[in-house]
Image (tube, helix red, strand yellow):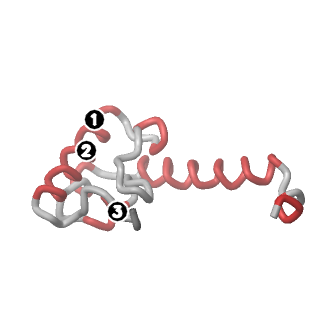
Amino acid sequence: MIGALRHLSPSHKQERVAIARVNRKEFTAKLKPEDIDYKRLDVLARFLNPIGKIDAARRTGATRKQQAQIVQAIKRARYLALLPYTINDIR
């Protein structure tokens, strides 16, 4: 397993992470206030990590106002059972 990972230098890993952040920040920059709604699950799902937690604004590139709207919309969607609170793994 270790031998298989040697061909990936740290720069390759950093590039992939940087690309993911740039794409997410570009998406957030284009986001309009009307797009942040508890019924728009496709938009809200982009701000959740694989476990189901809400991503921080520094990770998504959202402004303070956008982040507050996103958090409020996600909490409303969770309350109405449109989004899960967490992703249940085998425990």
Sequence-wise, which precedes: disc 1 or disc 2?
1
70 lies left or right of 59: left
Task: Looking at the picture, tell me which residue is in the foreground, 56 or 65.
Answer: 56
**Label 3 amino acid?**
Ile
User: Image height check: is 83 above or below 58?
Assistant: below
- Quarter of the view holding residue 39: bottom left
Please tell me how crowded label 3 is: few (under 14), some (14-19), or many (20+) other residues with Cα within 10 Å.
Answer: few
Q: Which residue is mark 2?
A: 71
Q: Which mark is residue 65?
A: 1
- Quarter of the view holding residue 5: bottom right
Q: Which residue is mark 3?
A: 87
Name the residue at 49% across, 47% down: 25
Please tell me how crowded label 2 is: few (under 14), some (14-19), or many (20+) other residues with Cα within 10 Å.
Answer: some
Task: Looking at the picture, tell me which residue is in the foreground, 27 or 7.
Answer: 7
**Which quadrant would the N terminus be assigned to in this image?**
bottom right
User: Image height check: is 91 above or below 36?
Assistant: below
Name the residue at 85% across, 65% down: 4
Which residue is most to the front? 91
Disc nearest the viewer among 3 and 1: 3
